[in-house]
Image (spheres, rainbow, N blue to C red):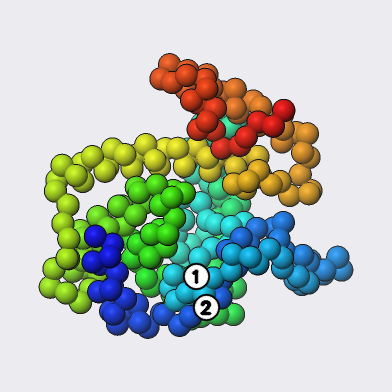
Amino acid sequence: MAMEAIPILADSTLLQRHSKPLLWHTDSHLGNIFVSEQDPTSITGIIDWQFTTVMPRFAQVRWPIFLNPPRDYQIGMFKPELPSDFDNMIPDEKDVAIAERDQATIAKCYEAALVRSDLSSYLALTRIEEPIRQLFTTCEHTYKHGIIPLRDALIKISQHWHRMGLPEKNCPYTFTPEEIARHERELAEYKEWHTLRRHTQQILHANDEGWVPPHVDFDKVQAKHKELFETYLRNKAPETSEEAARKLWFYVDRE
């Protein structure tokens, strides 16, 4: 299905407008960026270039790993706020809410800076609908992320083909109602797992590999990680074995 859709999309005026080739550093987390001791806003070096790629602008532009906005982030002139029910949340939920508000604020600063410094990239980031970008960027990562994100992009494109102004009269592929219903169930489980991972990373101030910024107390992070992991094992106990639950956890226990 992806092979049927991609050539049509690639020839569309919308994508052609934002398809200038760009160089992309694929691992721009804080551990790979060096700044001046005298002026932290001045970047003095970037390392770890071995997976650098050249692709169309619309497929390359994205949020840096350490600035990735939280769920339900709003593009444009919106001030990030705490949830309206913040005062009624339990402590861990408040920690997550504060972390997401702070992350959204940082992302908003980046968004404003991108408008000022590289308007073409900002337009490619905000004018191309996410299912289209997702289709082009998930094909090569099914070995890592599974088929669900790619299938989700294909379904959303087929459902909104005409609204997106795509060139053909009809989408070149179809999904049955039964296939869509099954996908929605699998997608809900997939999102639940990724939401748990994101919240864990926010609480621990860690990235996918477990890297923690040098200003964070690592002993406290380890203690918090142990607490979160034990809570996770207790919650998974009724539905799976401890061994299976450990395999699904985000960080490897090296003790």
- Residue lying at 47% horizontally and 74% vertically, measured from the top left: 55
Instruction: Tell whether 155 sits left or right of 25.
Output: left
**Residue named by callout 2:** 22
Instruction: Indicate left or right for 56 with 167 as reference.
Output: right
Dots 1, 2 in contact, CB < 8 A: yes
73 or 23, nearer to the observer:
23
For this view, does 73 lie left or right of residue 161? right
Residue 148 can be seen, yes or no? yes
Position of the C terminus by quadrant? top right
Judged from the image, the secondary structure of the residue bearing numbered disc 2 is: strand
The amino acid sitting under disc 2 is Leu
The image quadrant where one finds the N terminus is bottom left
Q: Please tell me whether mark 1 sits on a helix, a strand or a loop.
A: loop
Quarter of the figure with residue 169 = bottom left
Percent position (x, y) of residue 173?
17, 60
Q: Is residue 198 shown above or below 20?
A: above
Q: Which residue is mark 1?
A: 61
Res 98 quadrant in image: top right
Relative to 244, is 51 above or below?
below
Q: Position of residue 246 (x, y in %)?
A: 54, 27
| Residue at 66% over, 27% down | 226
Identity, as a three-letter code, of the amino acid under mark 1: Val
Q: Is residue 115 visible?
A: no
Q: Is residue 5 above or below residue 145?
A: below
Q: Nearer the viewer, residue 138 or 66?
A: 138
Return the residue found at the far top.
238
Residue 149 lies, in percent from the top left, at 36, 51
User: Which circle's residue, 1 or 2, is located before the other in the chain?
Assistant: 2
Residue drawn at x 40%, y 52% as measured from the top left = 142
